[in-house]
């Protein structure tokens, strides 16, 4: 239970925030599905020697015991369909009790089931361009090619969080060129075989690193690795994070070049050209990759045929006439949706108050310890601008912003602030 002192502190901050919004404007709108999940924080720089320490290790599903509490709370608050976790089975995950994955109840895209919410059929005559698996060593040549052909902004890059972790400037090169950045999970697993919390980490951390490196813009689209998604995973992606699930209506098979005899550069080019010369009554959303030079080469070979066959080239967001990001409409330079947040000096003051007033539970005690460290580490900072640059003060600012922005907190202030504090504690422990 929180003291009335603490509650009144939150109330004061909410009042102050509504009266004096900060100029900075990259937090989420209050009615956003992710308003309390990805608040502004210290922005790691790729040049920092400890850059990778801000995130989970690459190449594995993020540990479920260090997920931000706000993500876990949001997961708990949504209703998931009764779909079991699938068992890995050589690329075709299987379900318990003989359930059939093609049924509408499960609707696995691995078994070619789609829902009306899935994005895969663009409008007539539209070619929605996307590349999976970046950034890689093959990405720079792709980005050069796109730039030379004035097509950088017409590409969506579904990126792997772990790849970004070790090549953050590679992702930023796509951003700088004007490309649209989307989520391809943290470690490229069959998502239907992961626990709910496993899915949470795969999506959430990839969103976090992308937003950290792109001005706080929160990704709005994700593509499941191998196309492996079912209604349980869809519900987590959309219900927790507001992510749109993007699959495809043609698979080039470029990923199989070099590993399966039936797929060669020429065979994949031939298939692509066949689609480009064909029916335009529905658009094309083709699975392509920036994984290797061979996959990029296929695209470069067929590129001119997209326009010469009369297709309009767009990235995924533009193809469907939707916003690029959850909190930003178009491009990587357009405005990010604004909202009021408490001044940083107030937030740091609040952190001190928290230390004095929250001692009654393990989570709140832990939160107060973390924030106490945060407050003391930023004690020498005198201006709000300086404080804003501090990871510590950002965590404290997060407390105030989240407390006053969360719709749930206004409905049940006794519960939500506690969960936010626990989340802050976890974030602080993880990031600092
Ligand atoms: Zn992939």
Image (cartoon, helix red, strand yellow):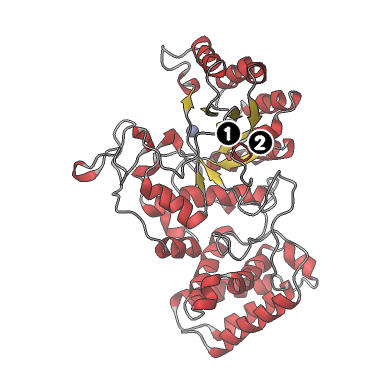
Q: Determine whether 31 is above or below 356 in the image.
A: above
Q: Which residue is mark 2?
A: 170
Q: Which residue is mark 1?
A: 134
Considering the numbered disc 2 on the image, is that residue within a helix, a strand or a loop?
helix
Quarter of the rendering occupied by the C terminus: bottom right
Considering the numbered disc 1 on the image, is that residue within a helix, a strand or a loop?
strand
Q: Residue, x 69% and y 65% (percent of image)?
A: 339
Residue 20, can we see it?
yes
Find residue 399 and report its horizontal and vertical position in percent.
60, 71
Q: Determine whether 150 is above or below 114 in the image.
A: above
Task: Using the image, tell me which numbered label, if any, was put on residue 57.
Answer: none
Whichever of callouts 2 and 1 sits on the residue coming sooner in the sequence is 1
Q: CA distance from mark 2 to mark 1?
A: 8 Å
Q: Determine whether 170 is above or below 78 in the image.
A: above
Residue furthest top as drawn: 266
Q: Are marks 2 and 1 in contact (CB under 8 Å)?
A: yes
Residue 49, can we see it?
no
Find residue 417 and report its horizontal and vertical position in percent.
52, 75
Residue furthest left as drawn: 97
Q: Residue, x 52% and y 18% (percent of image)?
A: 275
Categorize mark 1 by other alpha carbons within 10 Å: few (<14), some (14-19), many (20+): many
Left or right: residue 92 compared with residue 67: left
Q: Residue, x 70% and y 62% (percent of image)?
A: 338
Find residue 19 and report its horizontal and vertical position in percent.
74, 78
Kindly indicate the quadrant of the structure image that contains residue 230: top left
Find residue 305 and report its horizontal and vertical position in percent.
63, 16
- As rendered, which of 121 and 214 lies closer to the eye? 121
Q: Residue, x 70% and y 36% (percent of image)?
A: 173
């Amino acid at each position: 239970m929180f003291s009335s002192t603490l509650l009144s502190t939150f109330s004061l901050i909410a009042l102050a925030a509504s009266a004096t919004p900060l100029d900075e404007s990259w937090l989420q709108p209050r009615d956003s599905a992710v308003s309390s999940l990805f608040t502004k924080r210290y922005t790691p720089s790729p040049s920092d020697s400890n850059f990778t320490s801000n995130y989970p290790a690459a190449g594995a599903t993020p540990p479920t015991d260090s997920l931000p509490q706000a993500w876990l709370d949001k997961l708990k608050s949504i209703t998931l369909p009764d779909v079991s976790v699938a068992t890995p089975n050589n690329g075709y995950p299987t379900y318990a009790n003989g359930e059939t994955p093609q049924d509408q109840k499960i609707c696995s895209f691995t078994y070619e089931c789609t829902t009306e919410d899935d994005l895969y059929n663009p409008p007539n005559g539209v070619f929605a361009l996307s590349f999976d698996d970046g950034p890689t060593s093959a990405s720079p040549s792709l980005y050069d090619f796109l730039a030379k052909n004035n097509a950088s902004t017409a590409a969506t890059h579904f990126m792997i969080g772990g790849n970004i972790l070790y090549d953050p400037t590679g992702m930023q090169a796509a951003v700088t060129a004007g490309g649209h950045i989307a989520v391809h999970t943290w470690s490229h697993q069959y998502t239907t075989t992961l626990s709910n919390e496993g899915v949470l980490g795969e999506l959430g951390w990839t969103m976090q690193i992308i937003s950290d490196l792109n001005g706080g813009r929160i990704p709005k689209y994700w593509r499941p690795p191998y196309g492996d998604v079912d209604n349980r995973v869809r519900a987590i992606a959309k219900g927790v994070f507001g992510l749109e699930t993007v699959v495809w209506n043609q698979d080039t098979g470029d990923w199989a070049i070099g590993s399966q005899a039936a797929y060669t550069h020429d065979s994949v080019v031939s298939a692509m050209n066949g689609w480009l010369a064909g029916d335009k009554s529905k658009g094309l959303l083709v699975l392509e990759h920036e994984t290797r030079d061979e996959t990029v080469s296929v695209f470069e070979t067929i590129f001119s045929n997209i326009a010469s066959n009369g297709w309009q080239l767009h990235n995924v967001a533009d193809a469907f006439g939707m916003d690029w990001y959850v909190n930003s409409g178009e491009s990587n330079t357009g405005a990010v949706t604004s909202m009021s947040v408490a001044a940083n000096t107030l937030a740091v003051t609040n952190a001190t108050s928290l230390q004095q007033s929250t001692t009654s539970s393990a989570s709140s005690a832990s939160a107060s310890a973390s924030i106490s460290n945060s407050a003391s580490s930023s004690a020498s900072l005198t201006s709000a601008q300086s404080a804003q640059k501090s990871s510590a003060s950002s965590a404290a600012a997060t407390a105030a912003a989240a407390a006053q922005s969360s719709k749930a907190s206004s409905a049940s202030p006794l519960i939500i602030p506690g969960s936010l504090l626990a989340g802050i504690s976890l974030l602080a422990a993880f990031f600092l």
